[in-house]
Amino acid sequence: MVIVKGDSTVDILVLMARKPVSDFLFDVYLAIFSHYVFPSPSRVLFDPTCLKVLGSIVSLACVPTNKRATMTKSVFITGAAQGIGLATAAYFHRQGWFVGLYDINEKGLESTHRNLTRSCYGVLDVRDESAVIDAFRDFSLQSGGKVDVVVNCAGVLSSGYFENIDAAATDRMIDINVKGLTYVARHALPLLKQTPNSVLVNICSASSIYGIPLLGVYGATKHYVNGLTQALSIEWQQFGIRVKAIKPPIVKTAMGMSLPASFDKHMAANMDAEYVAESIWNSVSGSRVSYILGLKTQCLGLLCRWLPDSLARGLMKRACGL
């Protein structure tokens, strides 16, 4: 296309559009361009061989939002308003992904959504199976009917001696860490099945390696997460879906900082949520099922596996400052 104004000529080279642009859209673009860039042009000439970025720009602008999302990889994250979930959402967003933010914390979600431009969000209590179904339905509409990664991050923790943790706190850990995680995995499956090379990432814990005193019920819920992950990693191979378990030690989040003071000597919260988020990102392209984070945690896992049970119990007791 050559635009001539008086005696000057400006050549505009643009990438050829793969699909033809409608005459109407072309005329609209041309009118705007001529008005603001070259007021009152004496004549406009068209070279049919030079319809370049013009066509591409107009074609992209006419793609519906949900169709544009199909061009970008997408991740669905529970517990996304704080801690590891928030750090993971920010990390994937920096990589150019479309991020679905789901959490029970509405104010936190709104704040996170404002900061992450390629995102959608919804208030979600994972204990409510119907709400989980609705969340995936909403996300599907926003992501173009696919999900490349689901991060099952929502979880809660109550610490203390078993007999001192009340029934409500115990039920809450089981309902969120076990039932909620299961609901998310179950209802993520249809979207994961229709997305090539998709991944389910379950946030587990170092407490799934060996039962940790003062974290008895919490650790038991994470043993469940580990067992479910191992089983689904085999079952879902037939669908081309990979399933991962991320096992961090105590992390510097509000939940991690709530642990008993006796943990401070050997099991202090020294790992950043951002490191866990990066590990989740790396696991998506990795081949393993289980990812134990931190050298100390990895050594502890090996010792608990190979030491006689009496020594392993003694080691864990000392690690917890008991």
Image (spheres, helix red, strand yellow):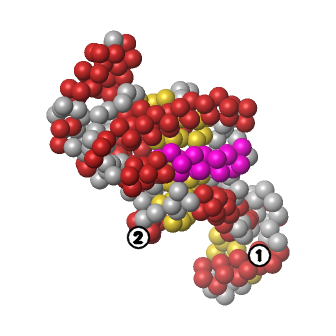
Judge left or right: residue 183 versus residue 272. Answer: right
Picture residue at 41% right of the left edge, 32% below the top: 208
Quarter holding the N terminus? Answer: bottom right
The x and y percentages for residue 316 are 27, 26
Q: Residue at x 71, y 56 (%)?
A: 145
Which quadrant of the figure has residue 304? top left
Quadrant in which residue 129 is drawn:
bottom right
- Tell me residue 83's x, y (percent): 37, 52
User: In the depicted view, which residue is nearer to us: 89 or 34?
Assistant: 89
Classify 208 as above or below 149: above
**Identity, as a three-letter code, of the amino acid under mark 1:** Leu
Q: Residues within 10 Å of mark 1 (few under 14, many from 20)?
A: some
Q: Nearer the viewer, residue 322 or 244?
A: 322
Boundaries of the magenta span: 177-193
Q: Which residue is mark 1?
A: 25
Q: Amino acid at mark 2?
A: Lys
* Towards the viewer: 250 or 317: 317
Ranked by sequence position, the earlier of labels 2 and 1 is: 1
The image's mark for residue 107 is 2
Label 1: which secondary element: helix
- Please name the residue shown 57% across and 46% down the image: 182
Q: Quadrant of the C terminus?
A: top left
- Residue 186 is covered by the magenta coloring: yes
98 is within the stretch colored magenta: no
Marks 2/1: CA distance?
41 Å
Does 22 appear above or below 159?
below
